[in-house]
Amino acid sequence: MKEEQSVKVGRRTFMRGAGSALAATALASSTLAKGGRALAGERPSLPGPESKSIASGAQYDVIVIGGGFAGLTAARDCALRGMKTLLLEARARIGGRTFTSSFAGHRLEMGGTWIHWSQPHVWDEMTRYGMGIVDGPGASLEHVSWLSGGKIKSGDAEKVFPVLADAMAKFCDVDGYGGRLVFPRPHDPLFHADEVRKYDGLSLQDRLAAVGFKQEVHDLISPQLTTLCHRDPASAGLADQLKLWALSEFDLGLLFERVNKYRIEQGTSGLANAIAADGGADVMLSTPVARVEQAGGKVSVTTASGAHYSAGAVICTVPANVLKSIDFRPGLNPAKLAASKAGVAGQGTKCYIHIKQKIGKWMGCGAFPNPIAVTWTEQERDDGTLLVSFGPPGRLDINDEDAVQTALRQILPGADVVATTGYQWTADPWSQGTWCYYRPGQLTRDMEPLRQREGAVFFASADSASGWTGTIDGAIERGTRVAQDVKAFLNRK
């Protein structure tokens, strides 16, 4: 069953021996700096920027914390506007919750993957750097199987898809207008704030119960919702799904096309490298930040190793879940800190499964709490089929190929697993989860506090994006916006 051996690193490996938040930060950094890997490898298959060695005490105009797409974009834009800029990244690579790796001779995306030309910010970067796209079979499937009533239902996609599309339309039609009254301007999500508040306190599970689908239809749509929120639907907010529906023009076919079909030809790491190479910002890898302190009109940033750097402004781009791990002085706004402690990101699994059988363009589904929510053909290969699979948290060890095979056979009997690979984003202290999907009540309560400036410290993350929250596009949106805000702020000083 072994095809490609990989190092398996969990949260305890990252955090073992840490007696404090600072010690945990330093240990995790050391693990990654020494080449520590999780599953398919922490390091991307495409080489990134060289990490500079910069003496403690150096001064900058702007310090950017975090080298994901928000941080890379912010650092580039600040540097291009003439600001002396330093980017500090905790990992031994850039890209944040994305990186391109290799598996059995094929290039795969271990985190954020799919983009679309309807996502304006990432598409602007694609055009800027001459990047291409490749499409997969995820939005053009031929066969569907799903678990319902203890049995496997199956059918041709052309017959099943209209049923699913109708179910999703009913699910999102909370206002009698297909959801259009709630998010008429999805890139301005609080434009109809009163309408949004009507539904923000509800969970996806609340809405499922209210609609009252027949069991067979419920068991078809529920796995899609579990995958979109990457958690238990009972802990995921309805408003986030309604916004995603609006961003997809109230159409399931367009939703699937925008969130699981087109990949970057050069890989997410290729785009990250292109942004990093532009502008001339200094980059320090394997440099986690422990403390951010404002005093005397300056901001001092202290790393886990004890080095310190100062700037007129800081842009913090770490995921919302990670904010609580940094010592901010003065402390974070209570609302921002509460959101970080509660967590906004998904906690589920993503893995690739190589099976011996050639099964064509297929999708399989299992309603929560099935260990595999949705899995589909990602690559048709000469030596079988490569599936990409998503599941809820705590239900499947993606390192255990036997467990993965058992789970897969519930939906695809007789499947022979050759190998699996994936990355444990929830075990990574620099992500503490996957993509952002707000809990009930969080969109209207926490989005604005998460992006609110605190003195000379600015915040930019995909987790607080106006449009495509939790995506590469959302990260670039926030990095672009905040870089402009920082320039204006420093000009006023």
Image: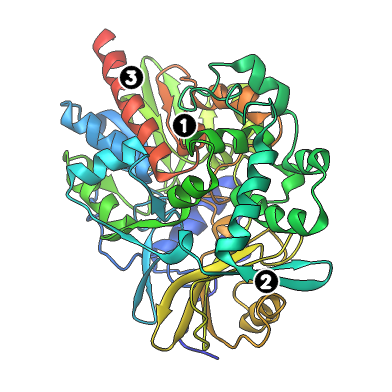
Q: Earlier in the sequence, mark 1 or mark 2?
A: 2
Point 56% across, 27% down: residue: 447
Q: Is residue 476 visible?
A: yes
Tell me if 211 is positioned left or right of 299 in this view: right
Q: Is residue 86 visible?
A: no
Q: Circle 3 is placed at which residue position?
A: 485
Image location of residue 467, percent across then percent down: 46, 32
Do labels 1 and 2 touch, CB within 8 Å? no
Tell me if 353 is positioned left or right of 241 in this view: left
Q: Which numbered circle lies on residue 52?
A: none
Quote the CA–CA distance across marks 3 and 2. 52 Å
SS under mark 2: strand
**Quadrant in the picture for the N terminus:** bottom right
Q: Amino acid at mark 2?
A: Ser
Q: Earlier in the sequence, mark 3 or mark 2?
A: 2
Q: Circle 1 is placed at which residue position?
A: 465
Quote the CA–CA distance across marks 1 and 2. 38 Å
**Quadrant in the picture for the C terminus:** top left
Image location of residue 204, percent across then percent down: 72, 41
Tell me if 110 is positioned left or right of 20 in this view: left
SS under mark 3: helix
